[in-house]
Each structure stands twice: as C-alpha cells, then as structure tokens.
Image (cartoon, grey):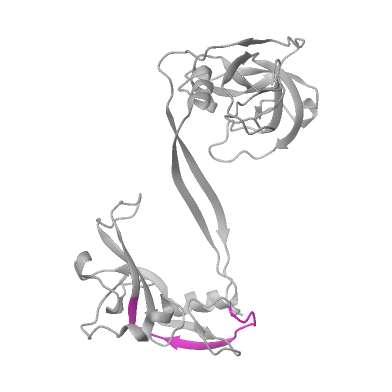
Amino acid sequence: MPDILSAPLVLEFPFTRSLGPVQSAFLTGLRARTVLGVRTAGGSILVPPAEYDPVTAEEIRELTEVAATGTVTTWAWNPAPRRGQPLDTPFAWVLVRLDGADTALLHALDAPGPEAVRTGLRVRIRWAPERTGAITDIACFEPYDGGETGRSAPHGGECGDPVTGIVTPARLDYRYTPGRAQSAYLGALSEQRVVGERCPSCAKVYVPPRGACPTCGVATAEQVEVGPRGTVTTYCIVNIKAKNLDIEVPYVYAHIALDGADLALHARIGGIPYDQVRMGLRVEPVWTEGGRHPDHYRPTGEPDADYDVYKELL
C-alpha cells in the first residue's frame, strides 16, 4: 500500500482597508485608552461600534464613551494558544459587555485556569504598554473585583491624529492530505509524467484528477497519461511580486490544456517575453533537477493551435 501523502500548508496575506468615521474614532480612541461605542436610534450602545443600525439599517454616528470595566457574558477556554493570538499562555476567549454598553466585545481574558472563569465574572481592560490604534491596544481583559459603573457619556470622537486605515494579517495553517486520485497524480509528477482519470460515463479526462467526474458525478478510476505538451487557452500577466516567490515581474500565468485532457490546468509560462504569450500557443513543461512538478512551460516552436481545438476549454 503506498504511503499516505501529507504536507503542511499556509495561506497568508495582508488585508488592507480604509476606515470610516466610526471605526476610525473607535481605534483612535483605543490608542488613547478610551473605549467608544455608538448609540442607535433606539438608544442602544453598540461596542464595538457599527456604522449602521442593525435594526433599521440607518447610518449611525453618535459616539459614546463607555467604561473599561465590564461583565463576561460567555466564554471558552483556549488551552493551546496559536501564533498571533493575544497571549502565549492558556487563556479564555470571552465576550465582555462593558459597563455602559448593550453589546459584547470579543477578546482574551488572562486567567490562571478555566476554574477561574465564569459567566458574570467582572473584568477590566489591561491596556498594552505601547498603543498604535488597533484592537491589540487592548492587551487582554483581567479579573476585577469592582462593581458595575453603568458609565456612558457622549463623546465627540476627537482624539487627534486619527487612524484612517489598518492592515490585518490573515493566516490559515492546515495540513493537506490528498486522496487516492490526487496521490497518484502527484506520484506521477515526481516521475515527470502527467496522469488524469477518465469518466466512465462521458469519457472526459480530468487533470488534475478529482476521483469523480464533476459533470456526471460518478467515480473515476481509469488512469490516462496526457501531455506532456499542451495549448495555452487563456492567460494573465502578473505585475505584483508575491512575497517569498523568487520570480521577477511581469510574468505570465496561463491555463494550459494538455494534449489528451478535457480540463485546463494553470502554470507559469517562461522562455518567451511576457507580451508574446497568446491564446493557442503550444507549450511544453520544463523540469528542474529533483523537482516534483514542472517549474514552468515554454513554447515548443509548433504552429499555434486552431481556436476550434481548445474553445471548449476556455
């Protein structure tokens, strides 16, 4: 029985967004150790603030300062913190309704163990020593033995040097284990071969194989070797350099219909100026020594394929 393939994968990118007047005031306020909510037409105070009333959908901008103390409304214990989380020791995720607010704010609670956390626990904000105008200006919550203040007061939102935009890193770590069909596909690639699977119903050959026909929904098992040459069906010119990818821009990524396949796969085109890549271009794979997949595809020198040959694979 072949070894089961498995590999760690990371999907990571920075998400950049501009802020409207409400979110800008909220984050600027955190930098000044001030928590701002927004009052709805019905009189409820939302923390964190929303830009539109969740009931009426009307725009709301009446800022209100609330207290830095509050009450835990619900919680969950996190025994194994992950990279980038607020604390590097076990902590509780809590929803805290700050005094003066009508909604709860999600953050971390620094507690010695789950036995120290309960619904109704009084807590207060522990501010970060250095604040930049981000939710991380609240380092975490910590237990607090004081009573509820019910504090709320109108606030003009003027804190000076307003925060107008934020960059939020998004990251997903997971382990990918391919199934039978994709394991066979990856194994063939390590031998510089490309295999797909044929649908027993419609006879189409899918590369990469999925173990089932996406059109007919029936299982596939018959392996078919395709390529190695193929035809560019569509393409795009990449002008933004990707982090940790040592390829100079601009370069071309294309959909390539390998000979004998009924589904185009995508790969980089090299060996030709980017502005000379075109639909119908005939290409072949270029393998690096020890590589487990083609590094890129290059022109074969053959005449371009006729449009009618690949038009169904666009």
Q: Residue at x 29, y 64 (%)?
A: 252
| Left or right for 229, reference 113 | left
Q: Residue at x 57, y 24 (%)?
A: 139
Residue 238 x %, y %: 30, 58
Q: Is residue 280 magenta?
A: no
> Dividing the image into 4 quarters, which one contains the N terminus?
bottom right
Residue 155 x %, y %: 56, 11
Front residue of 53 and 162: 53
Front residue of 152 and 209: 152
Residue 119 x %, y %: 80, 27
**Mark count:** 0
Q: Residue at x 49, y 24 (%)?
A: 21
Above or below — where is 257 with respect to 295? below
Q: Residue at x 64, y 24 (%)?
A: 47
Q: Which residues are magenta?
A: 215-232
Front residue of 21 and 220: 21
> Dividing the image into 4 quarters, which one contains the C terminus?
bottom left
The answer to whether residue 310 is visible is yes
Front residue of 43 and 132: 43
Residue 17's quadrant in the figure? top left
The answer to whether residue 190 is visible is no
Residue 176 x %, y %: 56, 62
Above or below — where is 237 with respect to 308? above
Residue 87's quadrant in the figure? top right
Q: Is residue 228 magenta?
A: yes
